[in-house]
Image (spheres, rainbow, N blue to C red):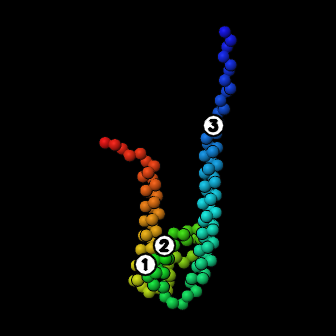
Amino acid sequence: MTPAPALPAESSESPAPRGLLSRLLRRLVGILIAGIIIGSILHFVARRVHDSSAPNGFKAGLLHGALMPLALPNLAVGDDVTIYAPSNTGRRYKLGYTLGVNGCGLLFFGLFFWRLGRWTPRRRE
């Protein structure tokens, strides 16, 4: 009988961590690029919107509240971004702002937890 051919020695590094690292790096770069684009757009729009002399009402508060989380990239790079209109109509603006922030949070976290719930296995009792 002839001896069986020797199997090649397995390398100590598996290709899985390298693939994971490249995916993670691509995702991080994508998030940074998206943040820069969103921050630039918001910076451009903020200059145009805040030129108005009329006080902001419910609709502007709703819009400012919904877009407030998108101010993070500008704040992170050191821009002093106004996230709350100083010239507003009072209670109506604040109500719109609160509804906008909560609606945006509900949409974001609702989708996040819905996807997270689909990934986790359910227990059967």
- Label 2: which residue? 66
Going by the numbered disc 3, the residue's amino acid type is Ser
Residue 17: % across, % down: 61, 42
Dot 2: within a 10 Å radius of its alpha carbon, few (fewer than 14), some, or many (20 or more) residues?
many
Label 2 sits on a secondary structure element that is: helix
Dot 3: within a 10 Å radius of its alpha carbon, few (fewer than 14), some, or many (20 or more) residues?
few
Q: CA distance from mark 2 to mark 1?
A: 9 Å
Question: Vertically, is 89 above or below 98?
Answer: below
In the image, is 37 to the left or to the right of 83? right
Closer to us: 121 or 28: 121
Question: Residue furthest toward the front?
Answer: 1
| Pointer 1 or 3: first along the chain | 3
Residue shown at 65%/29% (left/top)?
A: 10
- In the rendering, which numbered label is found on residue 96? 1
Q: Quadrant of the N terminus?
A: top right
Question: Residue furthest toward the top?
Answer: 1
Label 3 sits on a secondary structure element that is: loop
- Label 3: which residue? 14
| Pointer 3 or 2: first along the chain | 3
Residue 79 seen from this side: no
In the image, is 98 to the left or to the right of 48? left
Question: Vertically, is 19 above or below 89?
Answer: above
Q: Which image quadrant is residue 43 in?
A: bottom right
Residue shown at 63%/52% (left/top)?
A: 25
Residue 70: % across, % down: 54, 69
